[in-house]
Image (cartoon, rainbow, N blue to C red):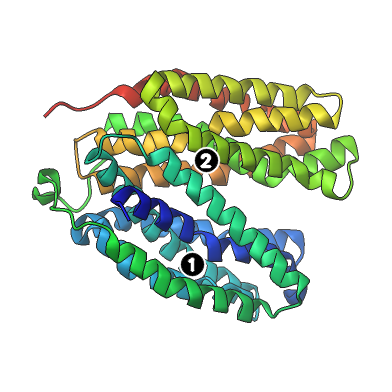
């Protein structure tokens, strides 16, 4: 396998076991007798772990290298994935999700840094396709998890067996990755902590509106269809399915589009699709137009984070792993802030107004897209 094929395979493998956990969440909620608010608090354990680890993950990846991070990180991450389904109470569920978040943040940072290194040492862009394979991986895992539910398989046994199968496969794949010499910037002495540079802060703000939108669609699209349009059954969940499919399509087409149009123009064109799609969603009189709008939003936000990863790693003002860690930290804040913000507004003004709060952050992302073309010249 070529390095490009290998890293894309690693991106596909990483979220499969985690994706199989997602369909099990309602069962865990029922088993622990958790109300919606209690479940929301417990599920905050995952982003809490990610936030706690990201400031250190950049230094870890920079010290041992992205390839070694993946070789040693995959088994640890896969060992952690089955544990939340066995949690005996809400406190242990929260703490186990914190541990899972720590493992998740480390391995995803390693994947992004490794993809950036391989991309720079090749002749074609691969970052968007890598994230496209990640999207396929989490969709595959969700389907596998749903299949286990249909078979009435114990969640711990189901996710545990899947993790055991993936563990040797993922290690073998990661060991095939080439050994890279440390870049000069990685070997320079540096202090243990520094303020983020204006460049990485600008790129992070660009991606903030994008991740706010992704998190909001994940949490609120089904509720919006059900409460505003009284959809039932599969029609309620189809909004997110359409969105996720278009995210995958956009990411698979993104690398070729980047080569043709450049990162800045591509980002602005896509975000115009996202902005127009969200306007359609919040003004749609019928569900069919909501699906069309969500498809446009999915295509529009698909390439934002991969483009931002490449741009942050290209800044050259500090090791790539540190900049990508800062970017990931601020991007995650978008996931955390977007859904509750919409809920607070919707409580007073309704869901249409709640989702409309995503429009200004998307406009800000369009304005900041020019930063994707900035590089520090050594």
Q: Quadrant of residue 158?
A: bottom right
Label 2, label 1: how far apart the Cα atoms are? 20 Å
Residue 334: mark in rendering = 2
Residue 73 visible in the picture: no
Q: Does label 2 or label 1 sit earlier along the sequence?
A: 1
Height in image: 196 above or below 375?
below
Secondary structure, mark 2, is helix
203 to 111, vertically: above or below: above
Disc 2 vs disc 1: which is toward the camera? 1
Compare residues 350 and 108 and report the one nearer the observer.
108
* Res. 295 visible in picture: yes
The circle drawn on residue 3 is none
Query: Is 275 on the left or on the right of 268, as rendered?
Result: right
| Labelled disc at residue 100 | 1
* Element marked by disc 1: helix
Mark 1 Cα within 10 Å, few/some/many (few <14, many 20+)? many
């Amino acid at each position: 396998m070529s390095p490009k094929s290998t890293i894309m395979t690693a991106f596909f493998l990483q979220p499969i076991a985690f994706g199989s956990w997602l369909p099990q969440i309602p069962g865990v909620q029922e088993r622990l007798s958790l109300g919606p608010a209690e479940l929301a608090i417990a599920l905050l354990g995952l982003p809490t772990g990610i936030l706690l680890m990201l400031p250190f993950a950049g230094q870890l990846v920079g010290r041992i290298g992205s390839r070694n991070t993946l070789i040693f990180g995959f088994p640890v991450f896969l060992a952690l994935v089955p544990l939340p389904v066995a949690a005996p109470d809400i406190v242990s569920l929260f703490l186990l999700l914190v541990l899972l978040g720590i493992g998740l943040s480390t391995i995803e940072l390693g994947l992004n840094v490794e993809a950036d290194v391989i991309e720079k040492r090749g002749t074609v862009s691969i970052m968007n396709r890598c994230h496209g394979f990640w999207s396929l991986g989490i969709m595959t895992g969700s389907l596998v998890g749903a299949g286990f539910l249909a078979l009435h398989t114990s969640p711990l046994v189901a996710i545990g067996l899947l993790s055991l199968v993936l563990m040797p496969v993922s290690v073998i794949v990661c060991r095939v990755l080439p050994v890279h010499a440390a870049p000069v910037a990685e070997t320079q002495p540096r202090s243990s902590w520094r303020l983020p540079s204006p460049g990485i802060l600008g790129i992070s703000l660009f991606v903030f509106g994008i991740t706010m939108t992704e998190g909001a669609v994940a949490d609120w699209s089904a509720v919006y269809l059900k409460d505003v349009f009284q959809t039932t059954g599969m029609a309620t969940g189809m909004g997110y399915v359409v969105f996720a499919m278009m995210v995958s399509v956009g990411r698979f087409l993104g690398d070729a589009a980047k080569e043709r149009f450049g990162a800045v123009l591509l980002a602005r064109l896509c975000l115009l699709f996202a902005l127009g799609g969200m306007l359609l969603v919040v003004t749609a009189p019928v569900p069919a137009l909501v699906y069309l709008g969500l498809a446009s939003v999915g295509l529009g936000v698909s390439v934002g984070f991969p483009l931002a990863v490449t741009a942050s790693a290209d800044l050259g003002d500090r090791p790539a792993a540190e900049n990508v860690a800062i970017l990931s930290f601020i991007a995650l804040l978008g996931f955390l802030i977007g859904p509750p913000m919409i809920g607070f507004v919707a409580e007073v003004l309704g869901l249409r107004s709640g989702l409309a709060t995503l429009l200004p952050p998307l406009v800000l992302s369009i304005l900041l897209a020019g930063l994707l073309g900035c590089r520090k010249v050594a």
